[in-house]
Image: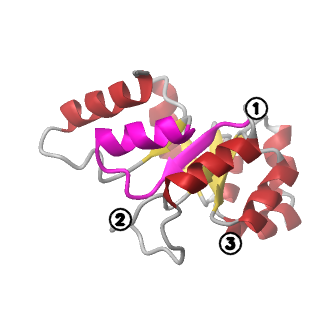
Amino acid sequence: RTWQCHDICTKNGVRLWINDYWKAAIKVGCFGVHIGQEDLGRCAAEGGLDAMKEKNMALGISTHSYAELSAAFGIRPSYISLGPVFGTKSKDVAFDPQGLVTVRKWRELIGPDIPLVAIGGINDAERTREVRDAGADMVALIGGVKKDDTKAAVRDLAAAMLMRE
């Protein structure tokens, strides 16, 4: 299935990111991989991080604590994600909501060279603006686009990320 997705994305000029399935992503040469902390150690031990570097693939890493942020720093990923920022119903998570204070702290600790992605409970343009103003460069979301008018939702979310007041 990964090859099929890769082919569709390539034909349409879309960058394919694979979440968690780093071996398949490396095999087909996807644009990038997002890895959670539970897979990071195994990926490193089995040569996955080196293989991604050799193929010039992008890498995103999830963080939920200072220890996980420290591990991500050691790898120098393409981006670091933090979540859940707010409570979420899209996925069962073992972490309490981090809140905007933690987004601000992550932005301070990460510095300007590594993009920060906020994830979790970002379900409308207002929350998108809040995490942007707290320092997130990007948002990853599900509920924010699961609306009756998906195109309008995407337009509003994009505008929220782009407009500075």
Proximity of marks 3 and 2: CB atoms separated by less than 8 Å? no
Per the image, the residue denoted by label 2 is 90
Left or right of 109? Residue 159 is left
Per the image, the residue denoted by label 1 is 113
**Kind of residue sitting beneath label 3:** Glu
How far across and how far down the image is residue 162, in percent?
43, 23
Q: Is residue 141 above or below residue 39?
A: above
Disc 1 on helix, strand or loop? loop
Toward the viewer: 12 or 159?
159
**Kind of residue sitting beneath label 1:** Asp
The reply to whether residue 80 is visible in this rendering is no
Q: Is residue 57 above or below residue 142?
A: above
**Kind of residue sitting beneath label 2:** Ser
Q: Which is more foreground, mark 1 or mark 2?
A: 1
Toward the viewer: 106 or 94?
106
Q: Which residue is found at the position 37% from the left and 51% from the top?
A: 122
On the rendered image, what quadrant is the C terminus found in?
Answer: top left
Report the magenta residues as a range. Answer: 113-136
Proximity of marks 1 and 3: CB atoms separated by less than 8 Å? no
Q: Which residue is found at the position 82% from the left and 51% from the top?
A: 73
Q: Which residue is found at the position 65% from the left and 60% from the top?
A: 63
Q: Which is more foreground, mark 1 or mark 3?
A: 1
How far across and how far down the image is residue 113, in percent?
76, 32
Per the image, the residue denoted by label 3 is 38
Q: Which residue is found at the position 33% from the left and 34% from the top?
A: 157
